[in-house]
Image (cartoon, grey):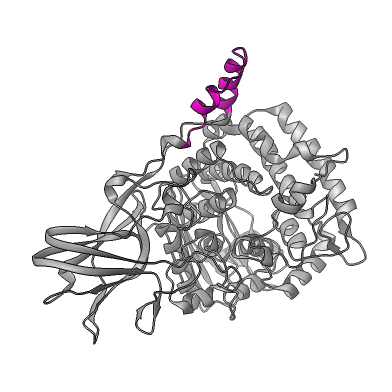
Amino acid sequence: MVGARISARNDPLPLILNKPFPSLMKPFLISFLTILTFAVTAAPTHLVTQQPLAVTTLPDGTILVDFGKVAFGNIDLLELSETQTITVHFGESLKDGRINRQPGGTIRYAQTKTTAQGAKTRVASAADKRNTTQPAAILTPKEWGVVLPFRWIEIEGWKGKFTRSHIQRNAAFASTWKDDAATFVSSDSTLDQVWELCRYSIKATTFAGIYVDGDRERIPYEADAYLNQLSHYACDPDPQMARDTFDHLMKQPTWPSEWAPHLIFMVHADWMQTGDVAWMSQRFDSLKKKTLGERAREDGLLVSNDKQIKRDDIVDWPLGERDGYVFTPVNTVVNAFHLRAVQHMCEMAKAAGKTEEAKSYAAQYEKAYASFQSKLFHAATGLYTDGESTKHSSLHANLFPLAFGLVPEQHKEKVIAFLKKRGMKCSVYAAQYLLEGLFENGAGDTALELILADGDRSWKHMLKSGTTITWEAWDNKYKPNQDWNHAWGAAPANILPRYIAGVRPIAAGWSKILIQPQPGSLTKLSSKTPSLRGPVQVKWERANKTWNVSLPNGVSAQLDLPASSGQKAYIAGKAVAAEMQHDRLVLKDAVTGQVTVTIK
């Protein structure tokens, strides 16, 4: 087992303190930087040896090796009876039965010449300067050798017989990862394939010990990290990698406006996952500037300057995924993120016993929320505009307010109808929030349709390509330099367990959870969702009208189950108190342990 390391060159404290600041300032700087920076480590990672799935000798004598899925790593050639001077090709993509040597974008292809002999020869490609020499790149241990993402190997020039026993892949993953921690199986095989694609994407991209944005740069970004965190929790409950990534990003933040509030989202998510108030409290003060509150004007709305309008206010990425968004000094998406961040800060202040700060954040939220509704909502259309000085309403100006709980009940119908009409006019990043907003507001059927959609803006498109890790964008034509190993494209890894199975915490640390399944067109469903208290299991079949729930010790669940008018809920043959809310039955009393609920 080998732990990933972060280069000391990334530590700004010695550099700052060696600057010619007045001596009286240095104690202040040390105190200030101690608040803002934490001891940054990387979660433990290791190399796992893997045997190939298949080995084929092609007509020209080239040996094609398939490891089944892409992983970050390299290979060993084993137990060679004679010296082999060969050319080895590494690839993520296959075309016409051969490794695609011109795959486009940042889809990986590499080759190297080597001389292999004896019991074991490690073979790796040359290092990519972009992701190993720039100061912000996260480095893997030197003793591993160079790692890159690949599924396929071609070997040219091999003499004699080649078998599976001659090769192994050294694949890098988090040491704590448990493959059986989470499961999702349904009546729709495509949905199950989407789940596995996304689940494995989260596992495969743990290779660096810190969440990075794919192989092109290997740099952490706040939005990528938060989406990684949500899906990591849904697939394996260990919080350490998310914590280490957060601490790293507090030392090396990136530039987009909306990326800063994502650090607040990360700490809030950690608190809800672990119930660890101490870890959250230690970082609370450092988060205050991440609300972007210094940009607020008198009415509480944030204002963007010219630089922020032209570059920093990102809305979505890449540029072509913004649905024609009109950028103005008062940006609706930026303000939606600000409101969500302030709301989270209020909740965390209360949990940490910071009563006065909680009151201050509550007042800040109330003022900004009122201005958000009066200045950014267009009554004539029933939609939010992109900003204060435009009448244009994009998908993004409406999906983020819906996802963040900012749309008043009386306006939801038109906003949801608009989102349904626009569809997936956003990137794989914003898809996380679009799906959350739909599932949270009674439009789960539409959300499931989007997950299973045809066309090139879908996970089905990724599956058809043969990739085994999600992409940075929906297709190369939307982002020509995209990676094929980007975990921010893996939203279904957390969306399916949280909303299709419906399992999510409503009290910090999973002592109380909500089970609110939205199976839509599915006819059966079985899921296991991990938590630090143990797995939560949900099983259902439409034919027998039963929901089987299994909870770990110390966890109680509020059940909110789909039903038809006039139906009742039964446990052990006895009707139980439940309230019909729209097309759902909400059981009055929480359940514990193992429970079977029949709806009829």
Height in image: 291 above or below 583? above
Residue located 30% across and 50% down the image = 46
In the foreground, 418 or 69: 69
User: Which span of residues is magenta-colored?
Assistant: 10-35
In the foreground, 292 or 105: 105
Prevalent SS, magenta region? helix
Q: Residue furthest bottom?
A: 59
Determine whether, in the image, residue 269 is placed left or right of residue 154.
right
Percent across and percent down for residue 463 are 47, 76
In the foreground, 228 or 349: 228
Residue located 49% across and 61% down the image = 486
Q: Tell whether position 234 is magenta.
A: no
Residue located 18% across and 63% down the image = 115
Where is residue 298, by image quadrant?
A: top right
Percent across and percent down for residue 86 are 21, 69
Residue 234 visible (yes or no): yes
Residue located 81% across and 59% down the image = 386
Height in image: 402 above or below 240? below
* Image quadrant containing the C terminus: bottom right
